[in-house]
Image (cartoon, helix red, strand yellow):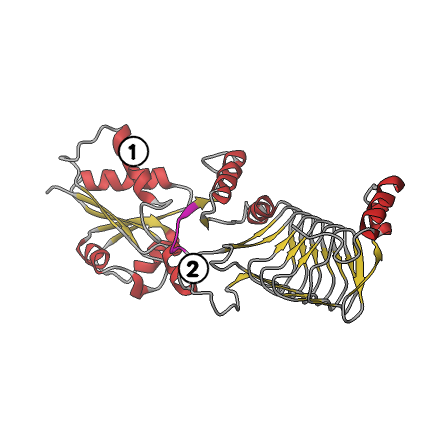
Amino acid sequence: MKGSLTIVGLGPGAPELITPAVTDALKDSTDIVGYSKYIDRVKDASGKSFYPSDNREEIDRAELSINLALQGKKVVVVSSGDPGVFAMASAIFEVVDKKNISRDDLPIVVLPGITALLAASARLGAPIGHDFCVINLSDNLKSWDILKSRVIAAAKADFVIAFYNPRSKSRKNQLSEIYDVLRKNCKIFPGAVISAPPQDLKYNGEQTYTYIGNNSTIRECVTINRGTQSKGKTFVGENVLVMAYSHIAHDCIISNNCILSNSVQIAGEVKIGEYTILGGLTAVHQFVKIGKHCMISGGSLVRKDVPHYVKAGRNPLSYVGINSIGLRRRGFTKEKINEIVNEINNNLTLLEKIS
């Protein structure tokens, strides 16, 4: 009797997610080969011979299943998820090619399964409705440097990334290391909500995102909404500190080296220049532009543009002076600061239109 070899995916775990074609193949089989934990999922099938093995014995499993099939057995090899996604299909075809086994001598069928990626994305909603990729974090078959380079390339291409095999008993730290690669030393504290759908009523589910630069810190319970069709993204630059309970609305631009103190509230499409500091409880009106190297005192209500280099405070917001202390801390010379003072004193009506 001529044997057969069927490679099947058992899906992500729930019995109801095993496809009917896989169920039929298991019923028709004589021998079932697989990792012991996957064998346990189908052991209720009676009248079968089971061949469980350790997780790292893919090639041995492949050779065993091929030999059984060549002996006339109807062999099913079980994998979780889909057998072609980091699973047994590739190992079996590798052995078949190495042994030069003809498909006429050994019929092979691959039956797809529901992957963990698909099951998880369905639970979340629709996170892979656009371009995405899948990366296996195991470095058994590729170096850690190659793995990191692929993650960086995927991130630069703006793919949604699904990570398989994120950790194991022997690989406890690789997922956190990959997060560090993606964040490049960003620190995001518990309770923060990053890139949630904006509260702006014109948002209609369009594909937008939030960008956070290297070395930025997002403290507890901060909310940062992603962009709308207006600008497409909310931008937080490098070395930015956003303190607890602050809110950054859609399409804002927070430039490099800014500090937003506790409970700062920033409405949509606000632009803040580099090295600017907003005191706690400051509220910034929609579309306002705040220049670079500014200092806004705590509790201020910012309803109009603020020029570069100034201190502002009080209600209504008023010009308080030049942010000379901040400028000195950032390496501005006395001569340069005096030049800025003279320029501002010569244009006290608005000082300077913020670009």
User: Residue 4's spot in the image, x, y percent?
Assistant: 17, 44
Amino acid bearing label 2: Glu
Q: Residue furthest left?
A: 1
Classify mark 2: residues with Cα within 10 Å, few (<14), some (14-19) or many (20+).
Answer: few
Front one among 21 and 251: 251
Horizontal arrangement in the rendering, residue 228 relative to residue 305 (left or right): left
Q: Residue at x 65, y 61 (%)?
A: 288
User: Residue 271's spot in the image, x, y percent?
Assistant: 64, 56
Q: Identify the secondary structure beneath mark 1.
A: helix
Q: Residue at x 76, y 68 (%)?
A: 300
Q: Residue at x 30, y 62 (%)?
A: 17
Which residue is label 2 attached to? 206
The residue stretch that appears in magenta: 128-134
Amino acid bearing label 1: Val
Q: Residue furthest right?
A: 334
Calculate the distance from the C-alpha at mark 2 to the C-alpha at mark 1.
Answer: 46 Å
Q: Is 64 inside the magenta-drawn segment?
A: no
- In this rendering, is residue 207 above or below 141? below
Q: Which mark is residue 310?
A: none
Q: Which mark is residue 95?
A: 1
